[in-house]
Image (cartoon, helix red, strand yellow):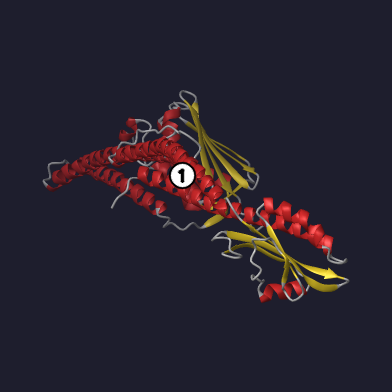
Amino acid sequence: MRIKYLYQLLLSHVSILILAFFIIISLFSHFVKDFAYQNKVDELSSYAQQITSELNGRDLDLRRLYPYQDMLKTRETRFIIFDEHQRPYFFPDDMPPREKLKNKEWHMLKQGKTVQIRAEMNRFNTEGLEVSLVAKPLFINDQFKGAVLLVSPVRGVEQMISQVNRYMFYAIISTLIITILLSWLLSKLHVKRIQTLRDATGKVASGDYDISLKNSGGDEIGMLASDFNTMAHNLKQSREQIDRLEKRRRQFIADVSHELRTPLTTINGLVEGLNSNTIPEKDKEKCFSLISEETKRMLRLVKENLDYEKIRSQQIKLDKLSLPLIEVFEIIKEHLNQQAEEKQNRLRIQVEAGVKVFADYDRLIQILVNITKNSIQFTQNGDITLRGYEGYKETIIEIEDTGIGISKEEIEHIWERFYKADVSRTNTAYGEYGLGLSIVKQLVELHKGTIDINSEKGQGTTFTIRLPLNTKNE
């Protein structure tokens, strides 16, 4: 059987309140009863002390007891004086002299102890009422001569407790009504907040992440709402990222299909022409050269994808060495100088001869080639500078160009796979597929380094790479 949370809260609040009142009433009734009995015993003990003080240490003069007898009679308290053999010789007229103390009680009196009984039923013909009694020993010249017994019925205790319970019952009813009203309001508030969370969760489950809950307090439900907002925000960002990646993946597939179709069509046409001898002999060498270039173009596409997957899955093992940075720059310049000259660009090197870099040679070349190609691609009749210097336990490499620059929006996505800052890159010979900079970032991170980009539209771009030096041999 399902019980709504609202009723669970109400039931728990009311149950706790009733239990608390039950415990309070029980304890209070016990306290009142004990207090009344103890108060009666203390009163009788006081009178017994006064009477024994009159009799102890001197001859028994019963005339001194009459004032006490009259006074105690008005308080419904009677007393008896026993001799050393427990024979009553002074008692009220209506007190039967046949009643005696118990042997155990009489033995305590002989030892000089006071007997106190807070409540006992049907003793000394008190018609079913509880009585309190106090007995004190009498000593004359240090000899036991008997005892003084005071008996008084305890009246009104049950009536007082009953009246207290009645008032407590009224208090319980009033408090229960107030508690139920307050609990109902608070429970409705909490249930409403929980229902809001349920509704929001249902929307998220259906794919609607554009939702935000109001933080209605600093309690656990408020913290849960805050955590829910964080979760929904993260899910929304993840979905947007997945959508972007899916869009780029589709664009990548379209680009790859286009790139593969063009060289394959060219190669197929040239091969058919060669097989049918429709191509003149003088043009055959040019045909073989075109076939070779288009084949290399397709191989670059396959190689870039394989490289990215290997790097992403950390299947590449680096063989890092301390390399002279100027020699690495010279190799990059020699490899890409022709491509730079085709766009009227100038490759410059700024590095001191003693600067070294601790890296895997092949992968460092791959990093610098990719970035330098990117700079050449977006620079026309400008300068591309390869700069290097040593920092604190690191080598800093900067590749700066004076090209068209990159906007802030594009910088945020420049390292993502398949991303192309300019769609015109699809038709260029270098970096066609939007994988180059993704591979660069992965390789730099494999070297435990960092790479940053600083660029403004029309102001050029600077890539900054920081690679840690080999400190183990120092």
Which residue occupies 58% across, 42% down?
396
Q: Quadrant of the C terminus?
A: bottom right
- Relative to 201, is 402 on the left or the right? right
Name the residue carrying label 1.
441
Q: Residue furthest top?
A: 458
Q: Residue furthest front?
A: 93
The image position of residue 223, as x and y in percent, is: 47, 40
Task: Residue type at mark 1: give it.
Answer: Lys
Q: Is residue 334 visible?
A: no
- Secondary structure under tag 1 reads helix
Reply above or below: 465 against 317.
above
The image position of residue 227, as x and y in percent, is: 44, 41
Q: Residue furthest left?
A: 276
The image position of residue 241, as x and y in percent, is: 36, 39
As rendered, which of 17 and 148 lies closer to the eye? Answer: 148
Which residue occupies 47% across, 46% down?
17
- Relative to 387, is 340 on the left or the right? left
Reply above or below: 40 against 333.
below
Q: Quadrant of residue 104?
A: bottom right
Which residue occupies 18% across, 41% down?
265
Count all numbered tags in the image, as a single digit: 1
Q: Residues within 10 Å of mark 1 (few under 14, many from 20)?
A: some
As rendered, which of 188 and 461 lies closer to the eye? Answer: 188
As rendered, which of 183 and 435 lies closer to the eye? Answer: 183
The image position of residue 355, as x and y in percent, is: 62, 46
As rendered, which of 245 and 82 lies closer to the eye? Answer: 82
Q: Is residue 420 visible?
A: yes
- Relative to 225, is 350 on the left or the right? right
- Relative to 378, is 388 on the left or the right? right
